Image (cartoon, rainbow, N blue to C red):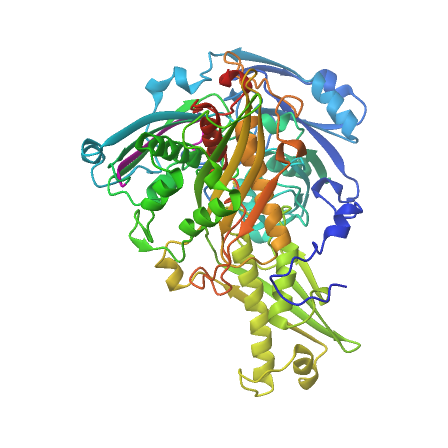
Amino acid sequence: MDTSIGTGNPIDRVEGHLKVTGMAKYSSEFPVDKMLYAQAINSTIAKGEISSIDISEAKKQKGVVEIITYKNAEKLKTPDKKLPPLSTTSIQPVLQSPQVHYYGEYVGLVVAETFEQAQYAARLVKIKYKKETPKIDFKNHRADAYKPEEESDYSRGDVEAGLAEADQKLEATYNTPIEHHHPMELHAVIASWENGKVKAYASQQMINDAAVTISNTFQIPKEDVRVIAPFVGGGFGSKLHAKQHVILAIMAAKKTGRPVQLTVTRHQMFTNTNLRQHNEQKVSIGAAKDGSLTALAHEIVSHTSTYEEYQEPCGTVSKMLYKVPNNKVTHRLVPVNLQTPFAMRAPGEATGSFALESAMDEMAWKLKMDPIEFRIKNDTQTDPSNDKPFSSRLLVECLRIGADKFGWDKRKMEPAKNTNGNWLVGYGVSGASRAAPYQETSSKVILTLKDGTVLATIQMDATDIGTGSYTIIAQTASEYLDIPVGQVVVQLADSLFPVTPGSGGSWGAASYCNGARMACQNAIKELKQKLNVGDEKKMSVKELMTGNKLTTYEAQGTAKPSEAFKEHSVYSFGANFAEVWVDKDTGMFRIKRMLNVGACGKILNPKTAFGQIIGGLTMGAGMVIAEQTRVEPNFGNFITRSFADYHVPVNLDMANVEVVFLPEEDKIANEMGVKGIGELGITSVAASIANAIFNATGKRMRDLPITPEKLI
Ligand code: MOS
């Protein structure tokens, strides 16, 4: 039993033993009676219409129970207009028409007694299409670019005037390719429909949101939808909302009257669980001789699907990270025949900061200024995008302390001057910021007193997507109840539990823990009131239970952002440092060292926090060295269709990584002073590596990924 008390200790994950012993149940692993298996069928054209479907052969196969296509699918709610997929009114219609919008779109579902039978029969469904010419690469269809319905253009001051008065100007375009989320656990669901009620074990990041989507799509009360996901093997944004496979499984369960399991295959995760779109980002910067920024424009062009609208907010960092009087951000979208892009691993910041922090490095070099000093010169304690003070902002400290730890003084400012045999050695830096949102969160605590020991059970619909939610919530309850962590049981991710915002957007830790805190504090307060004891009197939970002659007691709590939170800009900040060695002849390069210094409020558990940042750094490195989805430009099919060709970094790529958290108190963020960590870790990492490559070689790499042939 863990006898430590409270947050701040680097304790092991409380659910760790369940995971390493295989006892943790993921969505497709729940034993459910009379379960059927489903296999989805994907379109083999990118645009057009289904002209005929022949299910005769498939239907004859042993074990096949049902085949669903647009012809016999239940009519679902369809949105009145193109809804953004991030909308909480999300609706996920599927199999509603013969139209095909992208290669791999779901066009059918086979339901059978076994997984193998479903898979086999799915291959025998013969579908013919009337093909049309698809639009695939948005760069060939720029004339179709439009301003998104959800207005996101922003400006302050006069960028043209700011550029005109600048002593140095830079205009550069950066490209980040299509990427895929690829959590280890495949998207999966086991759904049942009984007496008009849905129960779904579904690998989702946000339980309540999934229930809302299901309720909206089937037009049934949300109270009749139960979503359960005690363990989620990663999401990275792809599991934020319930997607079409969840709806397909529920549809099949309703039709067959039996529970249905549907797992999205790794192949299908390229076509059916969203992607990060290709962004083309033009950054224009003006600066005075002394390094003060006079203007900053960030113009983004990317693609969305033909049926939904998603824009990645790549300009977020440009609006708020530096003091610049004249600023402009624009987004334009080109509809193409690919599935809708969606939030992936720090949407906006990960890609936007690559452009901004590369451009800042380019400008520092033009000014012959140290890139750290250039950033510090343009620091601000007020968010220039809304004139609100930052609740806390230790960006300068992150840069300075990082420089010291990293040995920045050994960097040669002039590129290609630092060599080691055949290697060119370069140092790079970047500044990072990520919003630290915090949302209304509820929780329940159940206290029991047994054999003289208090046990506390915390319930909330929060998820643990591998981040450590179970552990930090247990530590929080332990702190506010003043009992050892080992006496706390945390139960998560069930719609029957109090509502939380779920895991996404780096709001999980702050929201969950403050929600759990409120339940614990309320329990103590209520138990004291029952005894007519003042709030200030110190009494243990055991004394309170005994004093009240109680063996069990339940309390609820809800935490929400304060007025102070709303009056401030609340962000986590950080700095990334990278040392890269580039082989002069082959262009092969190694990331020798990485250092991340973060200022993210109170660190609830240094071990899980470290894991979060390591994950972010790995993804940031992945953006540079490997990750890229290639599209066949005529058919719109993805060429990269498995981990054999969609590469991610391995341990050897990430050999030497250091993470430092600066101690920070931020009571404005929330009562516990917790700020988000998850997405800060990936933000601007790619720029620090690309900047190190420039320092090593003198070659500016503006298109990711950076592969060796680009460096020869
Ligand atoms: Mo995150 S991209 O909000 O899971």
**Is 100 covered by the magenta stretch?**
no
Q: Main secondary structure of the magenta part?
A: strand
| Extreme-bottom residue of the structure | 532
Can residue 708 be spotted in the picture? yes
- x%, y% of residue 263? 69, 33
Q: Is residue 86 left or right of residue 109?
A: left
Viewer-closest of 204 and 163: 163
- x%, y% of residue 702? 43, 25
Q: Which residues are magenta?
A: 292-310
To which quarter of the image does residue 244 belong?
top right
Viewer-closest of 607 and 587: 587
Can residue 347 be spotted in the picture? no
- x%, y% of residue 416? 46, 24
Q: Is residue 670 left or right of residue 445?
A: left
Viewer-closest of 512 and 308: 512
- Against 396, is 140 above or below? above
Which residue appears at 81% of the width and 23% of the height? 62
Quarter placement of the N terminus: bottom right
- The total number of labels drawn is 0
Q: Is residue 696 left or right of residue 378?
A: right
To which quarter of the image does residue 332 belong?
top left
- x%, y% of residue 302? 41, 26
- Against 554, is 337 above or below? above
**Is 307 covered by the magenta stretch?**
yes
